[in-house]
Amino acid sequence: MKQYLVLDEWKIIEKGFKPDLQERSESIFSLGNGRMGQRANFEEKYSGSSLQGNYVAGIYYPDKTKVGWWKNGYPEYFAKVLNSTNWNGINVLIDDEELDLYKCKVSQFSRILNMKEGFLEREFVAELKNGKKIKVNSKRFISIVDTEIAAIRYSVTPINFDGDISFKPYVDADVENQDANYEEKFWAENEKRVNNDKAFLNVRTKKLDFHLCTGIAYKIFQDDKRVNVDAKIVEKDKYISFNFSVNSKKNIETVVYKYVANLSSENHEKNILTSETEKVLDKAINKSFSNLFEEQKDAWAEKWKVCDIQIKGDIAAQQGIRFNIFQLNQTYTGEDERLNIGPKGFTGEKYGGSTYWDTEAFCLPFYLSTAESHVAKNLLLYRYKQLGKAIENAQKLGFDNGAALFPMVTMNGEECHNEWEITFEEIHRNGAIAYAIYNYVNYTGDKEYLVKYGLEVLIAIARFWSQRITYSQEKNMYVMLGVTGPNEYENNVNNNWYTNIIACWSMKYALESALFVSNNFFEDYQRIVKNNNFDDELEISKWKEICNNMYFPYDEKKGIFLQQEGYLDKEQILVKDLDKSNLPINQNWSWDRILRSCFIKQADVLQGLYSFEQNYNLETIKRNFDFYEQRTVHESSLSPCVHSIIASKIGDNKKAYELYLRTSRLDLDDYNDEVAEGCHITSMAGTWLAIVQGFGGMRVKNGELNFNPTIPKQWDSYSFNINFRGYLLNIEVLKQQIVLTNNSIKSIEINVFGTKYKIQQGKSIFINH
Amino acid sequence: MKQYLVLDEWKIIEKGFKPDLQERSESIFSLGNGRMGQRANFEEKYSGSSLQGNYVAGIYYPDKTKVGWWKNGYPEYFAKVLNSTNWNGINVLIDDEELDLYKCKVSQFSRILNMKEGFLEREFVAELKNGKKIKVNSKRFISIVDTEIAAIRYSVTPINFDGDISFKPYVDADVENQDANYEEKFWAENEKRVNNDKAFLNVRTKKLDFHLCTGIAYKIFQDDKRVNVDAKIVEKDKYISFNFSVNSKKNIETVVYKYVANLSSENHEKNILTSETEKVLDKAINKSFSNLFEEQKDAWAEKWKVCDIQIKGDIAAQQGIRFNIFQLNQTYTGEDERLNIGPKGFTGEKYGGSTYWDTEAFCLPFYLSTAESHVAKNLLLYRYKQLGKAIENAQKLGFDNGAALFPMVTMNGEECHNEWEITFEEIHRNGAIAYAIYNYVNYTGDKEYLVKYGLEVLIAIARFWSQRITYSQEKNMYVMLGVTGPNEYENNVNNNWYTNIIACWSMKYALESALFVSNNFFEDYQRIVKNNNFDDELEISKWKEICNNMYFPYDEKKGIFLQQEGYLDKEQILVKDLDKSNLPINQNWSWDRILRSCFIKQADVLQGLYSFEQNYNLETIKRNFDFYEQRTVHESSLSPCVHSIIASKIGDNKKAYELYLRTSRLDLDDYNDEVAEGCHITSMAGTWLAIVQGFGGMRVKNGELNFNPTIPKQWDSYSFNINFRGYLLNIEVLKQQIVLTNNSIKSIEINVFGTKYKIQQGKSIFINH
């Protein structure tokens, strides 16, 4: 953990240049708009350590490197998030000396991510080796209005000299992935085109043939006056730059505007991609930087109206939650049903693949409450459309009769992750997909979703569980052998409590849903039975038989559910007793040592208690929390939020707050020493949950909203908005009072601390606590 | 399983050309001499499916492909056995049509591996598309006398025409590994040199800079007369060929002799490697093919004198054991202490690395009994010299105080295998290395080995176990969590019975050995204590404490040791009840399905009962054998031999014979459908054990040889030789009688069926049974 950013309500601020933390800052200050994004790499050359990253949604690389892939059922490839064309580069030279912050004297450096308005700004004074000093200001954004446009305003002001400044704005697709083997390059050139001060670089991926065309254009200004320059065009393989010099004087600012259009074959015909790119680029140029920028500010203001969470009296907490909400909105907008939410979004290449169970387990509730209803539904339909591939995937592993195993990691429905203990065994993900259907239906009341889409998915998932679970003669019960639970610091264990719980729940929910559809939509039911060869009587009775005789590991003495059989055979050491030099253990311990230790990467039993809290009394939840929290190292970003919510529930406010800070500032303060690789995007939804479900105690039961708010003692107040079945509510929690405001056009009934209240449209109610 | 080879006592014979089985035959008909070897690729071009393979001992490639290597403690690289310069190529053209058995009509094809004399012969008639028919005979061998020399006699006889025959003998290092990623090539050229009819190709590996120089020379004869030809020299990158034509007539045989010298920088200075190669090549030429061939036959005759096993009345069994002994002798000679025994020897590239626990557990007893004593000792010293690296390896995994974990796979002492469940968890190998020391000392009586080398290794291994084993409060006993036993169809299990047994045994043997050295060689003991910071009192008491309180999983009801905790929770299905289409399961089932099934890849509990039989009564061994044999699929080559030995011990002669056939003809009959990748060299020593320890019932106890022979009912007799502490014995087992012959220069006392007999030098005794 390392805190180096300035606290601010709306901005992420780095003061003073820190080359050691450059890769970390590149992640944190990333920009994106759901369609493309980039790490905060410098415009000018930088020879210090840096992870270059420009990413385009939906474009990936199927890496087929052969290592350990001899195991049957292994995926065909490992999907890599693809570093793509660098469009933000502007090299700067003064008298043939290149501006490079790693090599010159830097002062007055500041870098600001303006989350309110959606842009990145940087300012510094550089003294070059030749003694010349310049002041540089750069401002850039990726438009959330025109999602194929980005723009940069880059200015240089001489401080102690008059003379020429050379600029080289460029576009460069001769880029690599850091995780490439053998320095393999993934892009090949289709064509280059230069049209006056516009340049177009059209490239394709060497596998799968994704095309990407990037257009750049430049405009130069001094004293608000356009300066015409005679640019030399330099073309290399997959690279075009404009090289020109501008004569400047001391204290005169020279501004380079760089306009960018970035279009992919995911959205345009390949044969007209370059000409389409030119149209978009022209549109950007015609709007001009300032108009584009105004649009950007307005659009972000609209977004914040709904999704903002305000925390008063605790600036670190406020900054944390806004950073999380901002990055989530930069990553996924829900406008394109082919897309999903990659764990690192557009902030790094690690993990590969765009879809994990994170989406269902963590992100869905955020989008249900803060976005229009089609956004959450699109996330569900994404999986529905991939049901066929999930059935194929299960077949590969030896399951039949339409059983489905959804992939652990995917770009298009195919499994594309390559560790057997994850791919083949971390099967609880299948439960998360069933649970998301429940969550969606419960929240929205849209029961028709079950009829049209949901039930088929639920049947296929229940079929998987009923085959995956086996009967133990020894125990005279059903067992599930060889799984990896949410706690990935255990592999290939037997009877992981969480997986057993969610498996049985999935089967029960499938049978309830089948009953519901059969009772209410009989024709649809018949269609589903027929299309899926659903032998309902037989199959449902098998599901019931298993659920009624399932083994769940439990320790009588301690009164806790066991994460898996044999967990108590481990040496029981508490995290607090571990010398800090061991943490994070995933960077300090060998894998086998981690596996046989009692330390837990992320909520596992507690994930189950969170999902199914209604089945357990508070004492049980508390006992399990106290036991497992002490053994959890939270080295998964998905962990502290769940623990925080449970801590709130059991009234452990101190822990709830501590874990909230950990989840909300996980990246800003780099708790696990890994932000250099990218931010933890999907867990950011968990931060939102920690406030809304944790402190706010929000639950949806029987179609009604319930709140049980508490407030951390460090805070004066907090407030959030909720979209619920057409209503828009604001909930403000103060020290002594809760204010609920109904910003909708009709009245609503809600429950607070178990009491029902009616709030008229446009009105607020005030409840003391 | 597929039988296609002709049964013969001394030869492996393929009659009729079988392109579908070509890769399988290439493995089986492989040649080697301990220093180099090659698959039985054709001399002439072959466009059908083929795995090209030429291998040089000690030369490997450190593959650093990044896949899943993020886990801490992962090895630096995965060692690949390196396909190297092809020296046997001789392309043949008739009227510009290339001879290619995949494209022409082949008749009278035979391929013979002559094991008695150590050469490969092939003969066929080919009718080309142009209608011309030729008869071809090729004979080649790799000298076991001059281990850098090989020679080929390749002859072509026109059957239905007079005319030119073109030959292109070549040397080619522009080769690939089949397991290379991205078709990466591992060799780069140093130099080419042509000197009249000799060509030299000197190449280096791109990593590690191994150099290899291959020299070839050719001589042409017709009717025993030398024919001079004017060869055109074709040079390409890493390739030289001599192209020439010879005029021939119907029924006139043209013979091309190709002489080969193959020298590596493992044995010669790099800067004189080419000139040294020329010297060796000249030596080969001067000796001439026929003299080299005579030497080869004589040398093999010498080898067979000691190591042959004769089986009468069962030609399949006879052929099987000779094939095993032949391949073992082709792979490892014990002359070079830097070398070890790769699982595939020189017959394939799979597995990488040269040293596995196979060496200690299976090969050592074979070399102890059939080779001079320095051979077995060299195998032990190989590990002793790598003790430092084994300690480093353990340190990487978090162990301290000089604990050693020997690598699962290695070329030079460093771990070089890349599956965590093997590398980090299949730690029973450490026990095998301790057991090999015991085995060696027990067999040879060379207790000084303990003093000079063994004790240090034993202490380091015991230290590892004492740290790896942890205390379970739940059980109030010591446990070993997260291991992979010999049965690799289970990963990351708790309390694998075999691993627990061998760990405790290792600690006990270490403390006994410490006591022995301390009592008998006190000065040496003090040196060892000092050099190893051995706190003997404290450490030994810890070892005792663990051994006295170790948990061993056991099932009271069934009276069997449990392979690991929870084994009985699996669905208990017997191999005989499994539809044959599932076998081998490693080619038909996904990895997770294998893991959660009850099926066992190889002897696990039975491996322990084999190693420590003295601790268990026959009833116990029988109960465990009956239980586990029914669940064992023997998909490891190391499995059936152990089961066969135990079956012999418990008097289950039918099973013993069935499993003997399986182990001895594993490759010849391709039981597991995988011989195309190479032969199972190390398990071939297990076949020898199945006869000597299994049917012969040989044991060494208290410095004396013991025999308890049985004879399979299919056999008339069998006999084998044993080298024991300077004695050479022959044991012949007939239906009614056992004949023991003392071929030594002094008398010996041995035990047969528990009765002691003295055999005078040069005499035999006859015992009825």
Image: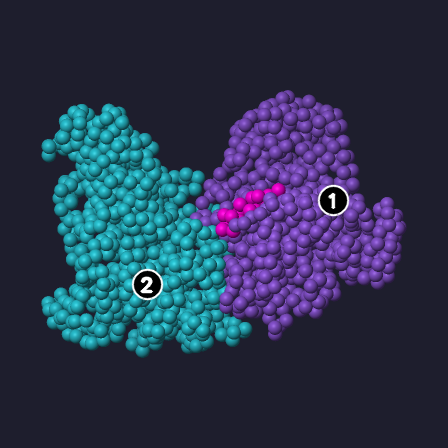
Chain colours: A cyan, B purple
- Mark 2 — on which chain does it sit? A
Circle 2 residue:
A642
Q: Is residue A341 magenta?
A: no
Residue A687 falls left or right of residue B61: left
Q: Residue at x 63, y 51 (%)?
A: B458
* Quadrant in the picture for the C terminus of chain B: bottom right
Q: What secondary structure is marked by label 1?
A: helix
Residue B525 falls left or right of residue B206: right
* Quadrant in the picture for the N terminus of chain B: bottom right
Q: Residue at x 74, y 65 (%)?
A: B651
Q: What is the number of the mark on residue B373? A: 1
In the rendered image, residue A395, in percent from the top left (x then y), is placed at 46, 61
Which residues make up the magenta segment? B385-399
- Against A607, is B241 above or below? above
Task: Count neighbours of disc 1 (C-alpha within 10 A) and say few if under 14, some if 14 to 19, many if 20 or more.
Answer: some
Q: What is the number of the mark on residue A438? A: none
Residue A259 in view here: no
The lab-note entry on whether marks 2 and 1 share a chain reads no
Cβ atoms at labels 2 and 1 below 8 Å apart: no
Which residue is nearer to you in this view: B167 or B692?
Answer: B692
In the rendered image, residue A707, in percent from the top left (x then y), is placed at 22, 70
- Against A367, is B423 above or below? above
Which residue is nearer to you in this view: A125 or B94?
Answer: A125
In the rendered image, residue B211, in percent from the top left (x then y), is placed at 57, 31
Residue A63 falls left or right of residue B578: left
The three-letter code of the residue at mark 1 reads Ser
- Against A447, is A197 above or below? above
